[in-house]
Image: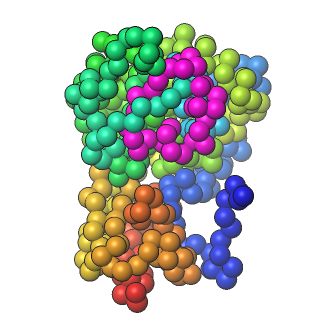
Amino acid sequence: MVHAPPRPPAGAPPVRINLYSDTQTRPTPAMREAMLRAEVGDEQHGDDPTVHALCDRMAALMGKEAAMFLPSGTMCNVVAILTHCRSGDEVVAHETSHILHSEGGAHAAFAGVQIMPLKGPRGMFTAGDVRAAIRPRTRYAPPQRLLEVEQTANIGGGAVWPLRQLEEVAAVAREQGWATHMDGARLMNACVASGVPPAEMVASFDSVWLDFTKGLGAPLGAVLCGSAEFIGQAWRWKQRLGGSMRQAGICAAACLHALDHHVDRLAEDHANAKALARGLRQIPGVVVEEPDTNLVFFDIRGAGMEVARLQRELLLRGVAVSGLGGRVRACTHLDVTAPMIEEAVAIIRETLAAA
Ligand SMILES: *Cc1c(COP(=O)(O)O)cnc(C)c1O
């Protein structure tokens, strides 16, 4: 049984072009400088001024009453689902959702909920799909309690939910008396790509969180937002899960720095992703999904190479990509430049040509 992350293959050079994930960004010198200067206190005790500044700013940005700093996005989902649901409840979410596939079964293990997987192109579903998922309120059916969406939809190709569609699915949930939760791991990518301000994007959702460790480039941290009542309840779960922190202002300072300096630049990541998609599309046998944001998914079955082999061969040439659901995923972020994109396309072309 191997549960620890794999180490890089022996003999592989350091990764020069890291398209593996936007989680792999390194804090910039300016961000480290901001961390160094952070005023801190005891977060668990309510005394860390920098954590308060971050939470106040996030609550205002999202148009919610309150916010809570947590170590990770996964913990935001775990705390939010524990807060919204009781054991035996059902959560309605897309079949490709992160809560279903990538959180170690946390929601079954801790909240005791089951997740009803909805189908739909690019990680999204419609109000009609939600309506079709409504169960009769009998003692036989699990009580449905929460609707969950991802903005952007990760496995959906970094797709941006149109605002109208978010409002429509949330309206069906509200009509049923369900709560609504948005996994906003890459919410700012969606806002920058669509031009919709965050508060408007999340207005029809009861709770939402933003990850600071994706394209925003902080070393750790995510902020969960909602009503004062919701965040008050969520604090109990944060404490129970051991996610309450001490001088967390060091990390909150990095997040504040990211809000000041790393949001507008996400547009560059989106332009780089489009350039990457254009370049990859020129390679024979490669089928590329047009990116909305910073995630580029492509299919190399037509090029005659397995995803795992391409990943290995690219690593030997200093390029990292990930494999997700039989496809290759390349992700742009603040440590990836336009010249790196050109070089990556050339290396991928040469590697696939050798197959
Ligand atoms: C990365 C991610 C998460 C988890 O965030 P972590 O900060 O890595 O725990 C949750 N949902 C989506 C859609 C993600 O991409």
Residue 91, position in %: x, y? 45, 26
Q: Is residue 85 visible?
A: yes
The residue positioned 71% from the left and 45% from the top of the image is 36
Q: Quadrant of the C terminus?
A: bottom left
**Residue sitting farthest toward the front:** 140
Classify 292 as above or below 328. above
Q: How is the image coloured?
A: rainbow
Viewer-closest of 73 and 341:
73
Magenta stretch encompasses residue 264: no
Viewer-closest of 347 and 82:
82
Q: Is residue 179 visible?
A: no
The residue positioned 65% from the left and 76% from the top of the image is 9
Is 31 on the left-hand or right-hand side of 64?
right
Q: Quadrant of the N terminus?
A: bottom right
Residue 73, position in %: x, y? 56, 38
The residue positioned 44% from the left and 15% from the top of the image is 140
Figure quadrant of residue 340: bottom left
Residue 296, position in %: x, y? 36, 60
Is 302 on the left-hand or right-hand side of 4?
left
The residue positioned 45% from the left and 71% from the top of the image is 307
The range drawn in magenta is 85-112
Is 287 on the left-hand or right-hand side of 185?
left
Classify 237 as above or below 307. above
Viewer-closest of 174 and 24:
174
Viewer-closest of 236 and 257:
236
Magenta stretch encompasses residue 101: yes
